[in-house]
Image (cartoon, coloured by chain):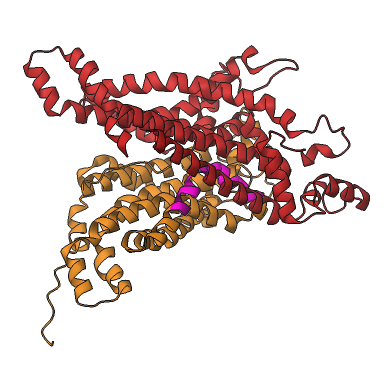
Amino acid sequence: MLRFLLRRIAWAIVTLWIVSVIVFAATSVLSGNAARAVLGKNAAPATLHALESELHLDRSVFYQYWYWLSHFVRGDFGHSAASVIGSDTAHNSIITLIAGPAANSAILAVITVIIMIPVSLLMGVLAATRAGGWMDHVTAIVSLTAISLPEFVTGTILVAIFATALSWLPPVSLIGPGQGVLDVPQILVLPILTLLAATVAECVRMVRSSVIEALDSDYVATARLAGLSESRIMFSYALRNALAPSVQVIALNMQWLVGGIVVVETVFSYPGLGRLFVSAVNLRDIPTTQSIALLLAAIYIALNILADLIITFLVPELRLA
Amino acid sequence: MTAPMARTTPNDARGLGRRLRLARHPAAVVGLILLAVIVTIALIGPYVAPFSPTAVADLPFATPDMHHWLGTDELGRDVLSRVLNGGQSLLGLSVLATAVAYAIGLPAGLAAGYTRSRTTNSIIMRGVDVLLSFPPPLLLLVVATGANSNIWAMVLAVGLVLAAPLTRIVRAGTLDVAQRAYVEAAVARGEHTGRILRREVLPNILSVIFADVGLRLSYAVLLIASVNFLGVGLQPPSSDWGLMIAENRQGLNLNPWMVIVPAMLVAIITVSINLVADGIARTLGTSIERAR
């Protein structure tokens, strides 16, 4: 178990290192000069040189990579290229730039997960106990639709209904100065609903099929013959054995949220890490893009390890692997 | 050696047509009809559009009337004409990205599944692991930064994202088939590897591929539309549906049709492809899993 975990973590570190090389190569090397990218073609030579030396663009690519990575792992993400122009250094440090948005994204993701898990399990079990009935068919069609839709389409449709037509909720996440996202909780509703639409649907499908499979097994038949009540059978036998595949799909969807927030935050202009990332990409702010990309990839990989760990814990046979 | 050598291949390509009785699945039939409608709109749309998709036709944000059935957008362009012109790029680029995915994933999966070299197998599969350790939107945005949102680079990137899980699926299918007697017979006959893969292995993993292709395409549509929505794919004045939704969202309360119509069309594409793919997977008896 411990050896498995250590090997898993070692491989994750290697993966993350390869990811950092890809991110750096794709953004720094391919895009050419990061200073020129943000300042534009008509930048004054003096400004350009100042920003180049600020971003170490006058050194070799390998030095730049090493400088970036060695500082990144120590928690120093460097300076944003976009805000370097005409501002003092304290304000353009990437870490101050992303701290608030990262917390906002975390709030969004945590609330989504807290709702996602019980709802998926409950709806999956309900659909399984009524397998073949009309409710099961409706659930199947609705969940297939929800899974198929791109997040930005789901979000846009929700805005059209709840913001434009009914005026119940704000279409975009407006926050006053000095306010946090939790001070205006109504802005959280539509982004969370959008994230839930995609994830819950997929989880329900998986929970349903694992519970049906478990209900079909010999030990459930034995339990029925022994005269145990249906609810006891469901919760002590079927659900317990359906838990491993269910946890797996829930974990996969938690991982999916890392990418999902990038799109959903953009739809709602939600002040999180995903929207900051998209705007950094569009502003050609390469240092910020690199740091957020590596940070999100690290979270993604960490969630993957966590999922493996929970599953090994739930399925004893896997512990030996 | 003139007598034809007995070909023992239980080629499942032959039985595939018979097993694909989609008519038994009403949802799949509905999906197929919807898909046909959308493809028709995308293909003939540009020829029947009443206005140019890029020309200013009236005041901005006009609500629907006799001249502009869906009103006008933020720049006063005719929404109906833009909608009719915006489907081709989305469908075309998605099909292209799916083709890229198969061009990469199919040979990579076959090679990883058939090779006896552990090194080849690990190089391919670790490559897949690395690709899968990026959330897809993240990888696409990183590529967009480097490639300056060049649309062909984005299609290639979407193809790569789709190729990673495909490689795993093809590899698993190949591993299974490679142990069968007919493959061993071909090896014993001294046929070279390329021929064995083409003539013996590939035809026998066709059902796996058939079950996958619809899912892969629907995911391609989802990613290409998202790329355009995020502003890192096709650029204005393109009338691509994903881009239209992004551009016109601010005016949603002034003329909702300029957002709702492209959103519904994108929704219908992905849902109908998934309905068909689900039907195919059910007829083939393979389990269907979303590959994201």
Position in image of residue A314 (x %, y %): 32, 27
The answer to whether one can see residue B156 in this image is yes
Q: Is residue B139 magenta?
A: yes
- In this view, the residue farthest toward the front is A3
Q: Residue at x 71, y 37 (%)?
A: A77
Q: Quadrant of the N terminus of chain B?
A: bottom left
The answer to whether one can see residue B10 in this image is no
Q: Which chain is red?
A: A
Position in image of residue A235 (x %, y %): 24, 16
Q: Residue at x 32, y 46 (%)?
A: B277
Position in image of residue B203 (x %, y %): 25, 64
- In this view, the residue farthest toward the left is A225
Q: Residue at x 84, y 33 (%)?
A: A89
Q: Residue at x 69, y 30 (%)?
A: A98
> Residue A269 lies in what quarter of the image?
top right
Q: Please tell me which residue lies in front, B7 or B236.
A: B7
> Residue B121 lies in what quarter of the image?
bottom left
Total marks shown come to: 0
Q: Please tell me which residue lies in front, B142 or B64.
A: B142
Q: Which chain is orange?
A: B
Q: Please tell me which residue lies in front, B248 or B173.
A: B173
Judge left or right: residue A218 versus residue B93.
Answer: left
Q: Report the predominant secondary structure element of the magenta stretch.
A: helix
Q: Quadrant of the C terminus of chain B?
A: top left
Q: Is residue B150 magenta?
A: no
User: Magenta span covers which residues?
Assistant: B126-145
